[in-house]
Amino acid sequence: MKRCAVALAASVALAALPLAAAAQQGEPVRIGLLLDMSSLYADITGIGSETAAKMAVEDFGGKVLGRPIEVLAADHQNKPDIASAKAREWFDNEHVDALLDVAASATALAAMNVAKEKNKIIVMSGPGASSITGEACIPTSVHWVYNTYALAHTTGKAVVENGGKSWFFIAADYAFGAQLEKDTADVVKASGGMVLGEVKAPLNTADFSSFLLQAQASKAKIIGLANAGGDFINAVKQAAEFGIAQGGQNLAGLLVYINDVHSLGLKATQGMMLSAAFYWDMNDATRAWSKRFFAKLGKMPNMSQAGVYSSTMHYLAAVKAAGTTATEPVMDAMRKMPVNDFFARNGHIRADGLMLHDMYLFQVKKPEESTGEWDTYKLVATVPGEEAFLPLAQSKCPLVKK
């Protein structure tokens, strides 16, 4: 009887295997995006990044490995604890296979800790902290679009070479602002310039007056804005009210999105130097995709939103090539496959998780040079990825073999 019972149990288990496989076959491949949907970064990530991911899924055909692809998006409110809690919930309860963006650096670093614990893939296009591929790197993360080192070595270096030798920094008071200030200060000093002072401004502050007064008092030629989104916009507007330019000082936006320039207008931003990984009007491929994006949202995409599309397509192609959503085979496929699309040419993922690609130095056009509402930049220089990003040999990532 015991033998019969064992045989019966075995036959039931074997019969259940096809049912389990069928259930797995029908369950969606889920990708998640933790974004700022309601605060100072909503315009530069938010619904635009979610739309870009959904465009990628649609262009991929809506399925991979015979399973439908589902995009989940949530508002982390720029709070690291919310980002980590949502990442954990998604991995544990919603069976999310990978995070394809986490906007902002502090929230991204928090989500990376959960991804490491759960052995899940996390790809980031919105945050900029260079520590993501430095001392905080993990085996399952990829930093796709830009980082503070690249911004500093593109924009910061160009400003110094154009005569901006003395600097005062107004930096957002969290990981991104601190690292952007440090990386740019290092470039300024290495290029023969000097830093006369710095001040930290709370995230999402409405009043920059005290910080701008300190910058004015420093007499620095350049006031470096190590912030982004709504903070950058507010700082530029209030700098105009304080007559910063009339006093002989110039602003240097160290992370400027096309959304910011569009919001402020060319009159307020003309001549400003900035660095980016993508601009919608660079070639036929960037224009074609960007016009599709515009048709959905009524605005042109920025580099982070284009990066979400590019990284989502790359991830799905890797899943298809690996024949599974399991983390290690997919990460291996992602590293082996080059990135060749409208976002990047001949890009590749390094051992530290950085997707290496070219960066671009742009200058904001004068109003009379623009031919339309979103015709805002002119290309000044293309900076090869090997020059824009930290050399791998200098990386602090523990995954890099010295």
Image (cartoon, rainbow, N blue to C red):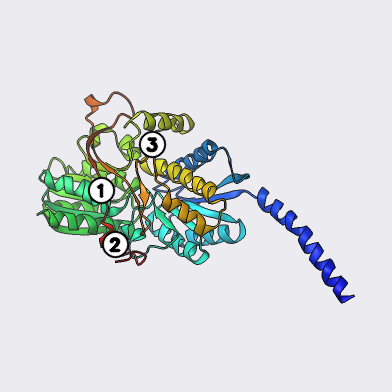
State the SS at label 1.
Answer: loop
Is 22 located above or below residue 393 in the figure?
A: above
Q: In the visual, does 166 lie left or right of 52?
A: left
Identity of the residue drawn at 71% across and 56% down: 20
Residue 317, image x, y percentages: 50, 45
Amino acid at circle 1: Leu
Could you tell me if residue 291 is visible in this image?
Answer: yes
Residue 150, image x, y percentages: 27, 51
Please tell me which of labels 2 and 3 falls first in the chain. Answer: 3
Q: Quadrant of the C terminus?
A: bottom left
State the SS at label 3.
Answer: loop
- Spot the residue most to the right: 1
* Mark 2–mark 3 distance (CA, rounded to whole Å): 28 Å
- Spot the residue most to the bottom: 2
Q: In the visual, does 120 lie left or right of 125?
A: right
Residue 229, image x, y percentages: 35, 46
Name the residue beneath numbered marker 3.
342
Amino acid at circle 2: Ser
Is 135 located above or below residue 388 in the figure?
A: below
Frontmost of labels 2 and 1 is 2
Amino acid at circle 3: Phe
Crowd tier of the residue under label 1, counting other residues whose Cα lies within 10 Å: few below 14, some 14–19, many 20 or above = many
Tell me, yes or no, whether the two marked residues, 2 and 3, touch with CB atoms within 8 Å.
no
* Mark 2–mark 1 distance (CA, rounded to whole Å): 22 Å
State the SS at label 2.
Answer: loop
Identity of the residue drawn at 26% across and 61% down: 393
Identity of the residue drawn at 28% across and 58% down: 392
Picture quadrant where residue 266 is located: top left
Please tell me which of labels 2 and 1 falls first in the chain. Answer: 1
Name the residue beneath numbered marker 1.
254
Identity of the residue drawn at 30% across and 37% down: 261
Name the residue beneath numbered marker 2.
395
